[in-house]
Amino acid sequence: MTVLCLVELDGTGAADASLRALTFARSLTAPDGGAGPAGDGLVAVLFADAGAVAGGTPAAGALAAYGVSDAYVVEPGQLPGYAPLAWARVLAGLTGATGASAVLAAGTDRGAEVMAHLGALTGAPMAANCVSAAPAGAGGWHIVRQRWAGLLLEDAALEASPALMTVATDTVAPAEAGAPAALTVHRHQPDLADGDLAVRATESASQAGGVSLANARVVVGGGRGVGGPEGFAPLEELAGLLGGVVGVSRVVTSEGWRPHKQQVGQTGTKITPELYLACGISGAIQHIAGCASAKHIVAVNADAGAPILGHAEYAVIGDLHEVIPALVAAIKARGAPG
Amino acid sequence: MEILVCVKRVPQVGGKIVVTGDGQDVDTRMSGFAMSPHEECAVEEGVQITERLGGAVSVLTLGPPEAAEQLRDALALGAGRAVLLETDGREWGPIATADAIVAETRRRAEAGQGYDLLLLGNEAADTGDYQVGVRVAHMLGWPCATGIKGIEIADGTVRARREYRGVEEVYEFPLPAVITVKEGINLPRYPSLPGRLRAKRAVIEEYQPQWQPDGLRKEGLRVPETERKQAAVLGTGVDAVPALMAVLDELGVLP
């Protein structure tokens, strides 16, 4: 079967989330679950300069490696910038033109928004944050999708063709096809309707780069146990020494101790660091939804029965106000000459 | 400025999430219920907008009779009117939910008190469907922005802001409109005592919309299998720092 997949770009290459969505999409096209070459057709849809996916570019290489046979590119001259309804209109048109049985996007802010518009345009259901899907019966699908930001899984029957889904990118790992596909790039001229561009993003001044919570290698977490806004100085110092950033639990932001953009969790940021050092964080399940993808979790907590210990590899039982300054001193002493 | 804020009653889960014996729902025997977090911020945002520009906030929920509790929470925060779209406890999908919200919006317009702005949460904490607001906007033919972290309104035009890959995006469109917001757009206030008293006495308007199937049918819920860890305790208090240093060294994160 033919499967359409929205591919977002990150700089010049395909975004990591979209590579995961392509991996998922390829598993639907091929009867062997996607380990071999793609089946009838894995079709990518991109909004970019055609030059960005010309032969030899990183994006074109990635699309071919992930088994994409055809890429439809809508250039800025046709559709300037991000306009969710217009992007959905393009997907709707290409669904008809390619006879696709399923249309997918990564479960990113944009992917979810465009797929919601596509569902609304067509009146069809849209299954958000799927972790697997398989055809079941005539035109139907059995899907497994995330609820509670991945804390629960839902088994469901999706009765619609084409099937509209977003992909849970924290669960589906990116994997190249067994053999690369021969990629054909098509410049696509979309048929847009009046008003499709009425809601369109304009970017304000780009913010400074640097280490962000989402891509930090080390995150030092602070929770209720920090005790107040003034208690974060040692955590900041430790994060600075480790080249990381401070993340916090929901109670910290709802108390106004720290800004919301530092929140790790279901309603904040999902983090994927090498080390998450959770200090004074009890480990409410909504927080775990945000830090479960950390490679290693170490907890510092006064309560040996705190739920966070059920998710951590190592723990120090003690008052973070004593442990963290002592750790900072130890790191500084180690770095000192002699 | 007439604003409708749509909120959802969701289980308040703490350290653990448990599924009922029949695998159909979250077990709530040991937990309470609360407004879904993004939507608590939607209520606060609606109240702040009317404090600046005048007008009133209505709050709506679709749920069982007990969901009146979340409507009263919203009334205590400053909403002036509450509408309960009462269900029989069955789960409603996003299409059916959007239909019911649109019916209330049209009912209000026909009464000559139409809404200028609908606010929803970006996604519900439990089902995480990410689409009810967009579907409502399509049915009404209104513009829509999702995941919004900042709203300014002047002369019938909305400026809505959100972040995408570290860059701020701005959307401008006319009212009436649908906006879904994310936690962090504001810090919801604590309800005042007069607010609580007013909420307790308020009359809630009730309607019984018709349930309809959605094309996506839940078969069951389960907790994903993950290896259950139990942390190895490195020690107690500052005495544990050398062992902690050894772990950090092993992970290669020390400078």
Image: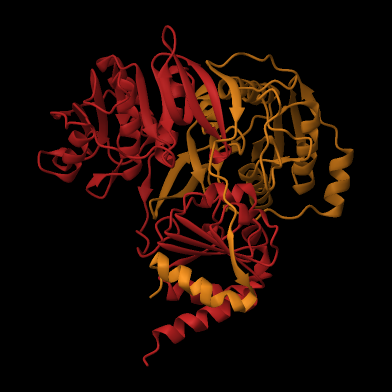
Chain colours: A red, B orange
With respect to residue A338, does B71 lie above or below? above
Quadrant of the rendering where the C terminus of chain A is positioned: bottom left
At horizontal 46% and vertical 80% (from top left) the residue drawn is: A331
Q: Find residue A290 and report its horizontal and vertical position in percent.
A: 53, 50
Left or right, B37 with respect to B31, comes to left
Q: Is residue A90 visible?
A: no
Q: Is residue A97 visible?
A: yes
The foreground one among A31 and A316 is A316
With respect to residue B109, does A273 lie above or below? below
At horizontal 65% and vertical 29% (from top left) the residue drawn is: B114
Rendering quarter of residue A264: bottom right
Total marks in image: 0
Left or right, B30 with respect to A190, comes to right
At horizontal 27% and vertical 30% (from top left) the residue drawn is: A45
Q: Find residue B58 and report its horizontal and vertical position in percent.
A: 71, 36
The foreground one among B180 and A230 is A230
With respect to residue A160, does B40 lie above or below? below
Rendering quarter of residue A302: bottom right
Residue placed farthest to the top in the image? Answer: A138
Rendering quarter of residue B187: bottom right
Left or right, B97 with respect to A240, comes to right
Left or right, B244 with respect to A323, comes to left
With respect to residue A70, does A273 lie above or below? below
Residue placed farthest to the left in the image? Answer: A55
The foreground one among B66 and B221 is B221
Q: Find residue A256 and report its horizontal and vertical position in percent.
A: 64, 63
Quadrant of the rendering where the N terminus of chain A is positioned: top left
Q: Find residue B254 and report its horizontal and vertical position in percent.
A: 41, 73
